[in-house]
């Protein structure tokens, strides 16, 4: 790598991911580490996560202040503003949070309508990511969601009045969706005016109720070529509306509204992962570690009490694993990846012959040392990455 800059680490961004694993109900397609909230007292888990944040400090003596905090889940919007304040205070007391940092909270539309939004903003939240998923009532019922399209739209409008940035999640490539119906729905979503969209294709993960239904033949997932058509339609509709993709599934109205936290993942920066099942990537003395916290909430809390941290061990990654991750994550983003970073870590030259073939097909381009996938190439991100991987 030129200029002596290390090819990964906190100079590519330093973030904190907090996983809150409870949801009021579990959606049938969801593959995350989630549990039914019931009448549970979240206090012990809030305290454990705060202690886990503190416990990371001695392991990361060189790390400066946090660039981002992301409260994801699960449904972290079930936390009260004072509980979110407790977690953010733990972060700022321990590492510091840079002024102007991005602090994202994931929320479902009904949480937004119930929440004290100014209280959340006062607690420090700067960005709300709303799980709208669809703006069609029949699709919301199919997806097992407990909101309707009117409340989703109202939630977005209220959030836009309070937070500097708002993101909407939508799920497309649903079994009976046509290009015309998706185009109309996507345009309705764009008309809500949120400056960030995350647009995911519906997936059928093996152990979820949807995955099992697909195996039984009760639900028929959309065919790959139909999905690809919807992906291409998505790119053209969002680009025409001034919301081009800056990553496979993510679109923003401007650089200011891109998810700075997710950019840390795609740039192979460092992030701490706290809360049940949270993953982290941390660079210490030039070595890169993958941490993963205990998945179940009660053992996680017990682990923090016993060991001061939710993870006893972190795995030291091998050079090839690191290089593959820099390439795979970097190629997801439209900005691409500097191949010198991949080559410096792996010691293996990425094939320029293969890149030339991809460029000829309109899938990739080299800009200096940066390899970028085109929108057409991003449809094939996994396959192209596998071809180039050291
Ligand atoms: S609300 Fe989100 S995290 Fe919770 S079950 Fe549904 S999809 Fe999963």
Image: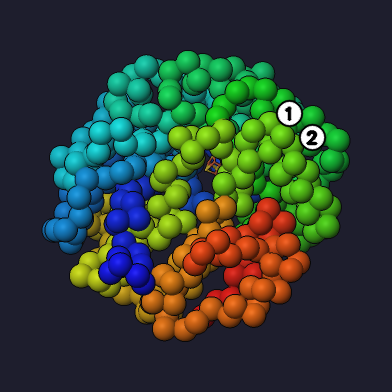
Q: Which residue is drawn at 67% across and 74% down?
A: 356
Q: Observer-nearest residue: 359 or 127?
A: 359
Which label number is shown at residue 183? 2
User: Looking at the rendering, which quadrant does residue 223 occupy?
Assistant: bottom right
For the residue pair 170 and 147, the one nearer the viewer reads as 170
Q: In this rendering, would 89 be left or right of 374?
A: left
Q: Which of 164 and 371 is in front in this view?
A: 371
Q: Is mark 1 within 8 Å of ligand 1?
A: no
As displayed, is residue 169 above or below residue 319?
Answer: above
Q: Could you tell me which secondary element the residue under label 1 belongs to?
A: helix
Side of 136 relative to 279 (left or right) = right
Q: Please identify the quarter of the rendering in which residue 87 is found.
A: top left
Quarter of the image where the N terminus is located:
bottom left
Q: Is the Cβ of the residue at disc 1 closer than 8 Å to that at disc 2?
A: yes
Q: Which residue is located at x 43 percent, y 18 percent?
A: 162
Could you say whether the residue bearing mark 2 is in a helix, strand or loop? helix
Q: Position of residue 26 (x, y in %)?
A: 56, 42
Circle 1 residue: 187
Placement of 66 over or under 369, stated as above or below? above
Q: Is residue 304 visible?
A: yes
Give the x, y percent position of residue 352.
60, 78
Task: Find the distance from the CA under tag 1 to the CA under tag 2.
Answer: 6 Å
x and y, in percent, of residue 72 in the image? 43, 42
């Amino acid at each position: 790598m030129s200029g002596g800059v290390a090819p990964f680490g906190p100079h590519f961004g330093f973030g904190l991911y907090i996983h809150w694993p409870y949801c009021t109900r579990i959606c049938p397609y969801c593959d995350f580490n989630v549990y039914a909230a019931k009448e549970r007292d979240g206090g012990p888990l809030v305290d454990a996560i705060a202690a886990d944040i503190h416990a990371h400090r001695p392991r990361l003596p060189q790390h400066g202040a946090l660039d981002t905090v992301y409260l994801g889940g699960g449904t972290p919007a079930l936390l009260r503003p004072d509980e979110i304040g407790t977690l953010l205070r733990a972060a700022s007391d321990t590492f510091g949070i840079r002024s102007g940092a991005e602090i994202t909270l994931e929320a479902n539309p009904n949480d937004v309508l119930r929440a004290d939004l100014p209280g959340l903003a006062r607690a420090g939240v700067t960005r709300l990511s709303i799980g709208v998923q669809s703006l069609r009532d029949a699709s919301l019922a199919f997806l097992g969601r407990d909101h309707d399209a009117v409340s989703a739209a109202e939630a977005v409008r209220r959030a836009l009045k309070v937070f500097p940035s708002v993101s909407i999640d939508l799920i497309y490539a649903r079994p009976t969706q046509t290009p015309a119906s998706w185009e109309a729905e996507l345009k309705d979503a764009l008309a809500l005016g949120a400056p960030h969209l995350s647009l995911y294709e519906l997936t059928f993960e093996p152990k979820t109720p949807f995955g099992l239904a697909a195996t039984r033949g009760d639900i028929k997932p959309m065919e790959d070529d139909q999905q690809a058509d919807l992906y291409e339609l998505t790119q053209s509709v969002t680009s025409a509306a001034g919301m081009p993709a800056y990553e496979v599934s993510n679109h923003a109205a401007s650089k200011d509204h891109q998810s700075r936290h997710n950019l840390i993942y795609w740039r192979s920066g460092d992030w701490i992962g706290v809360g049940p099942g949270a993953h982290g990537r941390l660079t210490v003395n030039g070595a890169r570690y993958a941490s993963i916290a205990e998945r179940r909430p009660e053992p996680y809390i017990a682990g923090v009490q016993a060991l001061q941290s939710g993870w006893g061990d972190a795995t030291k990654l091998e050079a090839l694993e690191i290089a593959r991750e820099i390439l795979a994550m970097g190629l997801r983003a439209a900005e691409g990846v500097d191949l010198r970073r991949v080559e410096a870590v792996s010691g293996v030259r990425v094939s320029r012959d293969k890149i030339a073939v991809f460029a000829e097909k309109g899938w990739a381009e080299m800009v200096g040392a940066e390899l970028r996938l085109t929108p057409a190439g991003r449809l094939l991100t996994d396959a192209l990455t596998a071809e180039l991987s050291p």
